[in-house]
Amino acid sequence: MNAYDSELISWMLSEKHYTPTEDAATADVAVFNTCCVRDNADQKVYGAVGHFKTHKENNPDQVLVISGCLAQKDGEEFVQRFPQVDVVVGTHNLADIPELVERVQLGEGPFVKVEKKGTHFHLPSSPASKFKGMVTISMGCDQWCTFCIVPYVRGQLRSRPLPLVISEVKRLAREGHREILLLGQNVNDYGRDLEEEVDFSHLLDGLNGIDGLDRIRFTSPHPAYYTQSVIDSMAKNPAVCNHIHLPLQSGDDEVLKRMRRLYTKAEFIDLARRMREALPGLSITTDIIVGYPGETEEQFQETLDVVRQVRFTSAFMFAYSPRPGTPGALFKDQVPEKEKMDRLYRLIEVQNDISYEDNQKLLGQEFEVLIEGRSKKHIHRCSGRTRCHRLVHFDVDLDKNYEGRLAKVKLEKGFTWGFLGKMVDVEPHYKAWSAVKQTV
């Protein structure tokens, strides 16, 4: 979602005739689009913004903008702590960035705009990639998990009307974007706030059969609201990829209850089973938090048990990071940092072994790969993702552009992170926007 917002900011500035630059020191406008899900994200931003004090001294006309979740959370603190900051814009006011930049250039400012409501649904998706795009279907969250700061910085659930989502996906497909990632804090919570009686299964059905749309992905669904109708719609739509990111967070029922996750260990395992029955070859990835307040060693073992049973393809694994203002940060029984890190390292070891073992079982098989581009380290090598979201590197001809094409790749060597393979076949060309434009 942050990457999507960054694309919107880039598009809005390009409409004002700005062009991207790699030289931060001489940029006319520099924007930090921030995250605050974990504390280390906060600290990275603070450190990076500090470097711009020198840039501003050497380039006093530079406009420095802080946007996104951390801007929403800290607001006025940014301009008080960092006098080099000119604009602070929260998650609800991204559309105001160009106007506020202009006002700073006219001698006004600094500005802090972190309102509690607003939306940028009216801004058109403007993907940085020619063949992949992101489309937001909802913003905010109504679940209020006790560890999560998202509802506080992105607000409550607001679903985008179904016709607007379908229209935008069709537009992107006409422009040559063959893979679409649907975005929402809880995508399968979609539609709960709309007057029209629609849900996420209706959305997936509405995207079925769109010409030029080869792949549909989405992130992230909530296990507690994963209905059988959504599973059925996934199975019916051939464009829906056989990969799902399904956040577990914990495998212990008491910890899940304290997190306010609204499902049990048994329900999660059963959901994974039903999904794999409906979608052969389904790859499941996940998020896991260890060391949540009050978590015992026995409860941590319950998480390891789920990991061993479900056998996730990969996982984002974290030691619990208290977020100010959330209930979890107020719990008195915080787990000592040393214990949290010990559990995290053990979890990573178990998951890495599973990833490696399961990847070995796929060697010799051929998979469809969407080629994303050449490796920066090995110019003769391209990389891409299978429909089940596995990363594959493979050698190609140096004198040809393969970006955006679908290839058939045989997996020859497996690792924890993905594969090395051999390209067996590839599309003759990729029909990009320049080629499609004349027929729209």
Image (cartoon, grey):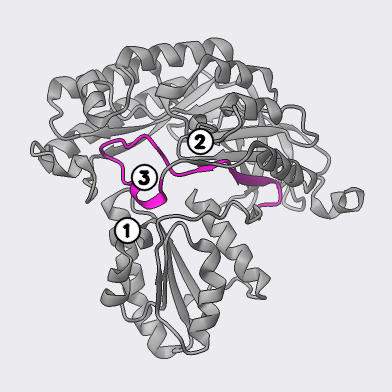
Residue 281 appears in the figure:
no
Q: Which residue is depicted at the point 36% across and 81% down?
A: 84
Label 2 sits on what residue type? Asp
Check disc 2 and report the residue beneath it: 193
Residue extent of the magenta highlight: 129-155
Q: Is residue 426 above or below residue 430?
A: above
Give residue 179's position: percent from left, percent from top: 67, 39
**Of helix, strand and loop, which one carries label 3?**
helix
Label 1 sits on what residue type? Lys
Label 3 sits on what residue type? Pro
Q: Which residue is depicted at the point 77% across and 33% down?
A: 210
Check disc 3 and report the residue beneath it: 151
Is residue 204 rendered to the left or right of residue 353? right
Near-viewer residue (300 or 380): 300
Q: Which residue is depicted at the point 14% across and 19% down?
A: 298
Give residue 160's position: percent from left, percent from top: 59, 42
Q: Is residue 66 above or below residue 8?
A: below
Give residue 217's position: percent from left, percent from top: 59, 34
Check disc 1 and report the residue beneath it: 73
Is mark 3 in CB contact (under 8 Å) with mark 2? no
Instruction: Please count the marks in the image.
Output: 3
Which is nearer the N-term, disc 1 or disc 3?
1
**Which of the two discs, 2 and 1, sits closer to the camera?**
2
Distance from Cα at disc 2 to Cα at disc 1: 25 Å
Distance from Cα at disc 1 to Cα at disc 3: 11 Å
Q: Is residue 428 above or below residue 94?
A: above
Q: Is residue 132 above or below residue 203?
A: below
- The answer to whether residue 231 is magenta is no
Is residue 320 rendered to the left or right of residue 243? left
Near-viewer residue (270 or 95): 95
